[in-house]
Amino acid sequence: MGKFQTLLNNEKTSGFVLIACTLLSLFMANSGFGESYQSIWTFPLGAHSAEHWINDGLMAVFFLLVGLELVDELYRGRLSSFQTAMLPLSGALGGMLLPAAIYLMWNAGTPTASGFGIPMATDIAFALAFLSLMGNRVPPGLKVFLMALAVIDDLGAIIVIAVFYSSAIDGMFLALALGLFALLLLLNKVFHVKTLAVYLIGGIAMWYCMHYSGVHATIAGVLLAITIPNNRDLTQSPAVRLRHALHYPVYFFVLPLFALSNTAIPLDGD
């Protein structure tokens, strides 16, 4: 178990697993079992497909974990000063606005101009996977910067989609989700509630409301991460305990499923 535990703890391992799942999925989708393989992810589970629940449900847990890591960096890490925190924010804004501006410059006055939001998005899961493959060759500060940049970029893309491309935003559910976010913040900052279960139950309710609001539900994971207590003087704060508990399930279950379901792409050119 010692060697296996060491393997799991190696940050390169999760990156290799994600890349391996991607290659396996592409192979299966373009093999003789392609249609059967794709039907696994399009199989309806209630109101939506299996792929939809992975992207909107399980990936919210991934965003929760990444959000917890970033909040920890804001409290006691490399983003704890205003100047360093503004750096990834500025980079993300530039990374969204510049590609959109170039796209609009080349497509101005055409029917395709409305697609300006497409080049704004970054796939954070694969970005972090490739980063992890580089191991210790990447300075820790650069990893934190790129992680923060990718999260901000992803959230920005979600907001752009909600504002410019979603025609059916349910204001009531969105207001309920934001109200739950505010309530959880109050429980943390004003009433100093440290019981993790309270935040998890509230987070599930917030995810439900966000999902049915028409806004991509993964944003609920980041919002929940902001509300969970992460005190400077608590080495085992609720946020720290949850972060440790989520590490293996996210990197060795959620992300592999995400890769398998989202890269089942036939390459036959039809």
Image: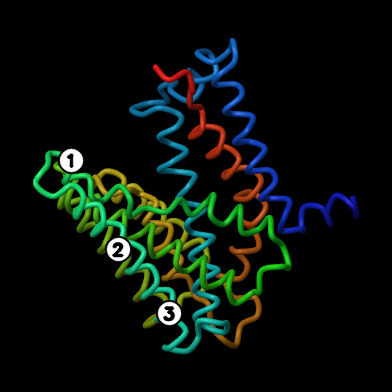
> Could you tell me which residue is drawn at 50 percent across and 86 percent down?
80
User: x%, y% of residue 264?
Assistant: 51, 27
Q: CA distance from mark 3 to mark 1?
A: 32 Å
Query: Looking at numbered disc 2 in the image, what kind of residue is underneath it?
Result: Leu
Q: Nearer the viewer, residue 209 or 137?
A: 137
Question: In the rendered image, which quarter contains the C terminus?
Answer: top left
User: x%, y% of residue 4?
Assistant: 85, 49
Query: Is residue 99 found left or right of 67 in the rendered image?
Result: left
From what the image shows, is residue 207 above or below residue 47? below
Residue picked out by circle 3 = 87
Graded by Cα atoms within 10 Å as few (under 14), some (14 to 19) or many (20 or more), the crowding at tag 3 reads some
Name the disc covering residue 112, or none: 1
From what the image shows, is residue 194 above or below residue 177? below
User: x%, y% of residue 247?
Assistant: 64, 57
> Could you tell me which residue is drawn at 40 percent across and 43 percent down?
56
User: x%, y% of residue 178?
Assistant: 26, 62
